[in-house]
Image (cartoon, coloured by chain):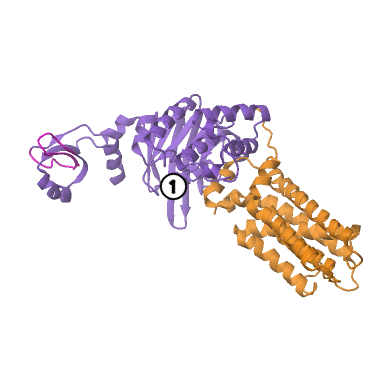
Chain colours: A purple, B orange
Amino acid sequence: MRLKIEGLSKSYKKKKALDSVNLFISNGIYGLLGPNGAGKTTLMRILAGLIAPDEGRIEFDGEDVLKNMDKFRYKIGYLPQEFGCYKSITVEECLDTIGVLKGIRAPERKKQIEQVLAEVNLSNEAKKKVGALSGGMRRRLGIAQAMLGNPAFIMVDEPTAGLDPEERIRFRGFIRRVAANRVVLLSTHIIEDIKNNCDGLALINNGKVKQFDGFEELENMAKGKVWKMVINSNDFYKIEGKYKILSTNTNADNNLEIRVYSEEKPSEDAEAVQPTVEEGYLTWINA
Amino acid sequence: MDKRVNKMVPLIFDLKTVSYVGYFILLAFAAVMIFFLVLMGGAATKYILLQTTVFVVSVVGVLAWILTPYMEIVQPESKELILSLPIDGFKYGFLRMLRLFAIYTGFVLLLLYFIYSISDGDRLEYGIVDIFLIAGALFFVSGFGMTAFLVSRQLIIGYGIPILWVAISFFYRGGASWLWHTCQWINPKPFESSLKYAVAHWLTGLVLYVVSAFLIEQRKYLMR
């Protein structure tokens, strides 16, 4: 399965939310990483048929999505950034209703609901009202509903927002299991989610998208620009004003071991280091 | 791809999503009944007043019953998901609204029949045309409310405009309501046939139901 996006643009008044976006995604988990307001949600909403692009083309398995949106909706599982519906009914009823709206027949629906509830560890909460669930549980319910109907294309917008570390790890395992033979597009501003989950990634900022072949390519964007220095903690404020500090650690001698971003070597004793994904991301965002 | 069947949402779902608002109306009916039948015992016009009040409450109530289950498609935290689903206007909109209308109106008609059956002559008419007129008025108001709600994407507008319409119809006795004198049953225009008002309400209600079903499919508009 393949998703191909070509020249996709969308403007809100004078602001370009998406600027000639090109993207090619095949089976597996694909990460879309960018700061808040970069255009991630706009892209997701266009793919979900909620807003129309100004121009561009989307193909899924060779089929024109924008011309066949009614048909394409059956192939999508979507978890929007905000998921807070049907608070007065139980978890099971909520999934049943969404299953009905997705057009899943009754016996199959029941089976799928049991399965997804077990996958997101909500089986014990099946009879609880949606309004009584915690933020993390509601997020898991959101993921469960996206899975209903066995969609070929799953989109999750900020899926781990509000999840605690254990739930995040569980989510990663879950999304990995469901990604087999499917296209999963995961949008986030949390680098950890991308690093630990995704087979490929694209960065988005100010409506422009850059696709990367792998994490190494992104890391290499910062090659020669990330330096490790050991400084006295009293000197930190001097360095802070001069360079972009990427990380700090206190070493055994009570000195600060810092990583800084700089186009040039910041000091004689600074040592060039292999950049991380995060540092590559920061380089691209600030370019 | 397997052949999918997009069915109506389960009835139990609708009965639960009508929420407290919908059932509060039933309490309002009970309060009206107690007030007139117990506290106003002996008053000559009590049955007419009771029927009039029940009718007025039912007009507000039909809005609660129709609009509340659809609130999810305009609320920011839920509309994105609902509108991304393959909902179709006919089943998710038209038929579902019709089902809610039928349940609620059936209850109102039974309640009015009960009042009629215990009254002793001081009462409003309750023949076939009257039933047709009452149900038609509720059908029109629910379609009007739903259309106003979807066009404005504001619940308050969905309630406000039809209630204003009904108030004008009642206080002006159909003076500024043309064929859509919704209160013809309780405050009739003299020397006018109720049937033409009933037909006008049913036909316009049908058009408004179709318009609502169409609006439900306008995802891009509802997402704004």
Residue depicted at 65% across the width and 55% down the height = B21
- Tally of numbered discs: 1
Type of amino acid at the residue the image marks with label 1: Leu
- On screen, residue A197 versus residue B122, left or right, reads left
- For residue B74, side relative to residue A107 (left or right): left
* Above or below: residue A184 compared with residue B168: above
Q: Which residues are magenta?
A: A249-268
Name the image quarter holding residue A29.
top left
Figure quadrant of residue B192: bottom right
Q: Which residue occupies the foreground of this view, A195 or B10? A: B10
Can residue A56 be seen in this snapshot? no
Report which quarter residue A159 is drawn in: top left
Residue sitting at x 12%, y 44%: A233
Q: Is residue A264 magenta?
A: yes
Residue B156 belongs to magenta span: no
> Magenta region's main secondary structure?
loop
Residue drawn 34% across the image and 29% down it = A214
Along the line of sight, the residue nearer the viewer: A56 or A116 = A116
Residue B7 screen position, x and y as percent: 70, 37
> Dot 1: few (<14), some (14–19), or many (≥20) neighbours within 10 Å?
many
Task: List x then y, in percent, for residue A193.
Answer: 37, 35
Q: Position of residue A116 (x, y in %)?
A: 54, 29
Residue at 50%, 35% (x, y): give it. A143
Rendering coords of residue A101 (x, y %)? 64, 38
Q: Secondary structure at mark 1?
A: strand
State whether residue B183 is above or below residue A246.
Answer: below
Q: Chain of mark 1?
A: A
Q: Quadrant of the C terminus of chain A?
A: top left
Question: In this figure, which residue is indicated by the disc labeled 1?
Answer: A18
Is B13 rendered above or below residue B63?
A: above
